[in-house]
Image (spheres, rainbow, N blue to C red):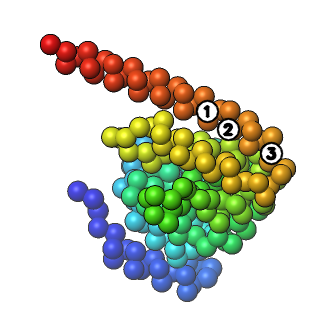
Amino acid sequence: MRPDFRPVVVCLRSLARYEPDGAALTVEICHKLRLAASRYETSASSYDDLVCALLTAQPAATLDGLCGGDARDLELGIRILDNCSIRKRPLDMVPPEQLLQWCDQEPHMRYPAMARIITISQRTNNDDPPRWTSIALRFLERAPDPAAVLHQFVAQFGDGGSGFGSHAAFVETNSALLDQLGAYPALDEAVAQEKAQVQKRVESAKHEEAELDRLWDDRFEW
């Protein structure tokens, strides 16, 4: 049974009015969650409501508490935020300018790391092709190594595909995002490289799907 964090969420939202005490408490809570997750004493996915509430009330302090520190601390924080993304996208709770300012403090390390888990695309409806989110484009504009950020974005192309649909088709659909970067000529070479890698992923996925279909058909032959 999932714990009910609704009363806690209401209390945490009030923390935004109390500085610096609210920030200090938020960092302490996040440090404890990160430590427990690192010891496999808890599953971060059980605390998605809590993490989203903290990011709403104290975004900078929450990011510091979960992801601040050295590269290992950042990786642990990214894992927690990623595990909290099953039902929600935690970083959607953070005002874009605050997320960018936080990344600017350690830009070479933080921009590529956060690029792994921010929401990179959206659709007006299911019939429209995906479009880059504004925060994804801001990352490309502000990161010291936009090619590294783009590489992490492309790694997300297969995320969220239906378990009952074609993974190859899902990746191929998302690859249309790479055709929307004409306004970033400095990324032309990186875009070409990513397109080549995506095509290999699509071909590999199609081969695997065809093989699975063949095995499935053979299994039910009389």
| Residue in view at x 70 percent, y 60 percent | 137
Left/right placement of residue 170 relative to residue 149 reads left
Question: Residue 64 at x, y = what percent?
Answer: 63, 62
Q: Mark 2 vs mark 3: which is more N-terminal?
A: 3
Q: Label 3 amino acid?
A: Asp
* Image vertical order of residue 95 relative to residue 42, above or below: below
- The residue singled out by tag 3 in the image is 188
Q: Are marks 1 and 2 in contact (CB under 8 Å)?
A: yes
| Residue in view at x 68 percent, y 33 percent | 196
- The residue singled out by tag 2 in the image is 195
Task: Single out the residue that lies furthest toward the top.
Answer: 222
* Image quarter hosting the N terminus: bottom left
Residue 84 visible (yes or no): no
- The residue singled out by tag 1 in the image is 199
Q: Residue 162 versus residue 151: which sits nearer the camera? A: 162
| Residue in view at x 68 percent, y 43 percent | 151
Q: Label 1 amino acid?
A: Gln
